[in-house]
Amino acid sequence: IRADIKETEKEYVVEAELPGVKKEDIVIDLNDDILTVGVDVKGGTDKEEDGYICKERHTGSYRRSFQVENIKNEEVKASYKDGLLAITLPKAEPGKRGTKRIQVQ
């Protein structure tokens, strides 16, 4: 997963490239100071050519983790459009930690 992380005074923004991925297959977890972005892919195609039926299946998963400190877990937001996942992580006071599963919009 290719990703860019931007920092402003108020937040971090993680932008990750996930081309061809369905929004429902994206999993984002924030556990203590670790943000994990993952994809669980299950798919396949059925093709009929010249009397033959070709069935191709592919499954897999991949994850990428980032260390992000002092985040307001309850205010984290994620959106996905045109193969680009954007996660906004508002900054909190130092020392606050927690766990949260983030829904993709």
Image (cartoon, rainbow, N blue to C red):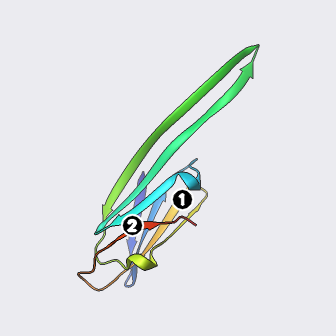
Helix, strand or loop under label 1: strand
At x 45%, y 74%, the residue is 76
Reply above or below: 86 against 53: below
Position of residue 45 measured from the top left corner of the image (x, y, whole percent): 65, 31
Looking at the image, residue 41 lies above or below residue 70: above
- Residue that carries the numbered disc 2 in the rendered image: 5
Which residue does the image show at 50% across and 36% down from the upper left?
59
Above or below, comparing residue 48 to residue 68 in the picture: above
Instruction: State which quadrant residue 24 falls in.
Output: bottom right
**Which circle's residue, 2 or 1, is located before the other in the chain?**
2
**What amino acid type is highlighted by mark number 2?**
Ile
Residue at 44% across, 43% down: 61
* Mark 2: secondary structure: strand
**Residue 92: quarter of image:** bottom left
Q: Which residue is mark 1?
A: 84
Marks 2 and 1: CB-CB under 8 Å? Answer: no
Q: Please state the horizontal and vertical placement of residue 71, each as a whole percent of the image.
A: 34, 77
Q: Which image quadrant: the C terminus? A: bottom right
The circle on residue 45 is none
Q: Is residue 60 above or below residue 38?
A: above
Picture residue at 50% right of the left edge, 55% below the top: 26
Disc 2 to disc 1, C-alpha distance: 13 Å
Left or right: where does residue 50 sit relative to residue 104? right
Q: Residues within 10 Å of mark 1 (few under 14, many from 20)?
A: some
List x then y, in percent, for residue 19: 55, 49
Q: Position of residue 56 (x, y in %)?
A: 59, 27
Tag 1: residue type? Leu
Q: Residues within 10 Å of mark 2 (few under 14, many from 20)?
A: few
Relative horizontal placement of residue 47, taking residue 72 as reference (left or right): right
